[in-house]
Amino acid sequence: MFDPKDIIENIADNVRVTHNPFGLNKEGFNTWWKEVDVPATGDALLFTGLMYQLVPYIKAATGYLEKYEDKPMAKYLKYGKFIPKTVANMGLQKIASQDEKLKTATTLGNMVKILKASDVSFFYDHDLDEYSGVLLYDLGDQEGFENHARFVAKKLQSAGIKKLITVDPHTTYALKVLYPKITGISFEVQTWFEVADLAGKAEHGEITLHDPCFYGRYLEVSDAPRAALNKAGVNCTEINNNGSFTNCCGGPAESVSPKLADEVGLRRVAELQATGKPIVALCPICMVNLEKCGADVVDLSSVLVDAI
């Protein structure tokens, strides 16, 4: 295991300087919308929280963390915050998979197609789309999280945003539950699958759904993706640990201990694979960790888009 303090200090410094956990230039990695016909006006802002866009960098960084965990080189991680952000940015861009970047763009593009086909009034503004800071909260940097939350909330409020459509559980929980308590600023927050309304026949006839912890336990919206799937002609083969009793994918632990994340993830993958049905996830972090633990998993959006 890495020293949690080293991890937190690196992430906190990146968020403080660049507003995302990897110290990346947002204009360099949030480019998916350039190839998608996204509405410029609408009632609700599509707010990705940049989580899907960060997946290629999460996978690349986790690979290096796995390589050096419990090795002598691990002690040098604490010096990462002293590397110039421009240098770190170039390094991460180089090691991040282009295939993963394309996969991310396709996933977000599918969500846009689903929202448009569902006659949802929404728009996207890449300048307003920011990382929520939720990893700081998860790792215990309350002060850092609160400062970042105020930055994001005030930016949205200044732009007159009242309604948000979110695409991942971590961002949804931060905006819907944490931000109002910390910033005093509230938005009407719904997930993309809660507003999806597709009546058709998707290609996958039966699947097994992995419920993310935030959706299942804390936000209690697990019925919504199942309802969307059912309307699209897809049945869910359930496992015992689902909904509010879901088991973790292990992903949240990967920044501190990839080994621990794998132990948790392998147990979850065994549960999901036992049904013999295609595994579907609706969280980028879950996707990363379940795949890393050997699961063949697809995003919910790729299943529902077939019903259009």
Image (spheres, helix red, strand yellow):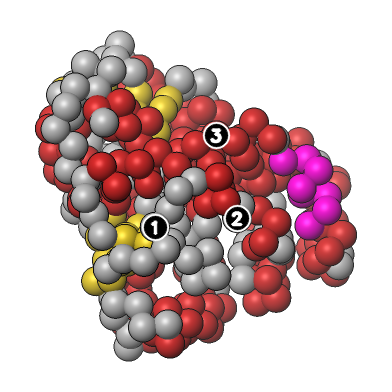
Q: Which residue is mark 2?
A: 30
Q: Are marks 1 and 3 in contact (CB under 8 Å)?
A: no
Q: Is residue 99 left or right of residue 166?
A: right
Looking at marks 2 and 3 on the same chain, the residue that comes earlier in the sequence is marked by 2
Does the image show residue 66? Answer: no
Please identify the quarter of the rendering in which residue 237 is found: top left
Q: CA distance from mark 1 to mark 2?
A: 17 Å
Q: Is residue 185 left or right of residue 142?
A: left
Q: Is residue 244 left or right of residue 249?
A: left
Q: Mark 3: which secondary structure?
A: helix
Which residue is drawn at the image coordinates 45% and 42% (left, top)?
109
Task: Tell me if residue 106 comes above or below residue 205 in the rendering.
Answer: below
Instruction: Report the amino acid beneath label 3.
Output: Lys
Residue 167 screen position, x and y as percent = 37, 52
Total numbered circles: 3
Q: Which residue is mark 3?
A: 103
> Closest to the observer: 93 or 268?
93
Q: Mark 2: which secondary structure?
A: loop
Which residue is drawn at the image coordinates 36% and 83% (left, top)?
160
> Closest to the observer: 253 or 110?
110
Looking at marks 1 and 3 on the same chain, the residue that comes earlier in the sequence is marked by 1
For discs 1 and 2, the disc positioned in front in the rendered view: 1
Quadrant where the C terminus is found in the figure: top left
Instruction: Report the amino acid beneath label 1.
Output: Pro
Residue 304 screen position, x and y as percent = 28, 32
Q: Which residue is mark 1?
A: 39
Q: CA distance from mark 2 to mark 3?
A: 13 Å
The magenta region covers: 89-96
